[in-house]
Image (cartoon, rainbow, N blue to C red):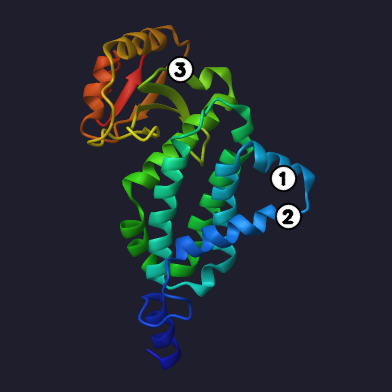
């Protein structure tokens, strides 16, 4: 391996760094908070004032994306973990059904997918390290919460049941846009999760009963992958048919 390639690899792994040793995520959020307040766009500022938390989250992703070549692999992982932890707590504090949050939910999802695609291309062999160390329960909860919110606005039939601690909805994959049955439970911080983490709130019997009735009345068949070993138990409580690693709503 040539010396130039060795230096590049060492920098990616964080052995050398041209950036300050303070937290990358803290720097970006602090800098972004001031930058977005100075944008001279009336519509942007109106949307920002209507949903300041989500506007900040989106703007921080944009800033990270623009500066990503200046960060080492370890700094990228550090930012990703801390960003989605902050995002999960902020998402847990808002009312998802309020339309003022929609534009930022969509923007955050778009920017997230763009960054992941760019990292896949730029990190190459190191991308697996990023995925293994950068993905946390917080990133999973934040992603699920955004998907639940977006499902509320896609069409009325996308949300099959929305309860206090349980939501059943029709999600979409990014390739064929086929509807997939999704079941999420609420975490103590207010986010939705596909996984029953230790701090997931207990689902009351009334939620199960009403969700089961909503599925019974849903007009079309659906299927969804069982993403956790507890998922089959949850699916059975809702009256779904289990076959292999999938749950089916049979009509």
- Disc 1/disc 2 C-alpha distance (Å): 7 Å
Residue 2, quarter of the rendered image: bottom left
The residue that mark 3 highlights is: 160
Is 52 situated above or below 222? below
- According to the picture, the residue beneath numbered tag 2 turns out to be 39
The residue beneath circle 1 is: 45
Distance of mark 3 from mark 2, alpha carbons? 39 Å
Q: Quadrant of the N terminus?
A: bottom left
Marks 3 and 2 close (CB-CB < 8 Å): no
Q: For the residue carrying disc 3, how many other residues have a C-alpha within 10 Å: few (<14), some (14-19), or many (20+)?
A: many
Mark 3 or mark 2, which is nearer to you?
Answer: 2
Q: Are marks 1 and 2 in contact (CB under 8 Å)?
A: yes
Image coordinates of residue 94 in percent, x first then y, are 50, 32
> Is 144 or 57 nearer to us in this picture?
57
Q: Earlier in the sequence, mark 3 or mark 1?
A: 1
Q: Residue at x 65, y 36 (%)?
A: 50
Residue 43, image x, y percentages: 76, 42
Front residue (pair 144, 187):
187
Compared across the picture, whether 55 is left or right of 84 comes to: right
> From the viewer's perspective, is the residue at label 3 or at label 1 nearer?
1
Other residues around mark 1 within 10 Å, as few (<14) / some (14–19) / many (≥20): some
118 sits to left or right of 13: right
Q: Nearer the viewer, residue 139 or 214?
A: 139
SS at badge 2: loop
161 with respect to 208 (left or right): right
> Which residue is at a point 43% across and 73% down the rendered structure image?
72
Residue in the picture at 39% in, 48% down = 85
């Amino acid at each position: 391996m040539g010396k130039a390639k060795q230096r590049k690899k060492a920098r990616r792994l964080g052995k050398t760094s041209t950036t300050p040793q303070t937290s990358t995520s803290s720097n970006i959020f602090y800098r972004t908070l001031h930058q977005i307040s100075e944008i001279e766009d009336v519509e942007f500022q109106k949307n920002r004032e209507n949903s300041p938390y989500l506007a900040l989250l989106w703007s921080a992703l944009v800033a990270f994306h623009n500066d990503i070549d200046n960060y080492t692999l370890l700094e990228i992982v550090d930012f990703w973990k801390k960003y989605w932890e902050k995002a999960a707590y902020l998402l847990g504090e808002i009312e998802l059904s309020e339309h003022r949050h929609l534009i930022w939910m969509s923007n955050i999802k778009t920017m997230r997918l763009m960054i992941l695609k760019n990292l896949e291309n730029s990190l190459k062999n190191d991308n697996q390290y990023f995925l293994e160390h950068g993905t946390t329960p917080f990133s999973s909860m934040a992603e699920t919460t955004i998907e639940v919110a977006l499902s509320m606005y896609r069409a009325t039939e996308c949300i099959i049941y929305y309860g206090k601690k349980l939501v059943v909805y029709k999600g979409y994959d990014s390739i064929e846009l086929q509807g997939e049955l999704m079941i999420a439970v609420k975490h103590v911080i207010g986010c939705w999760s596909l996984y029953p983490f230790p701090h997931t709130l207990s689902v009351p019997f009334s939620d199960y009963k009403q969700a089961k009735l909503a599925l019974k009345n849903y007009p079309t068949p659906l299927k969804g992958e069982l993403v956790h070993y507890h998922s089959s138990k949850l699916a059975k409580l809702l009256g779904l048919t289990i076959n292999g690693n999938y749950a089916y709503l049979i009509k």
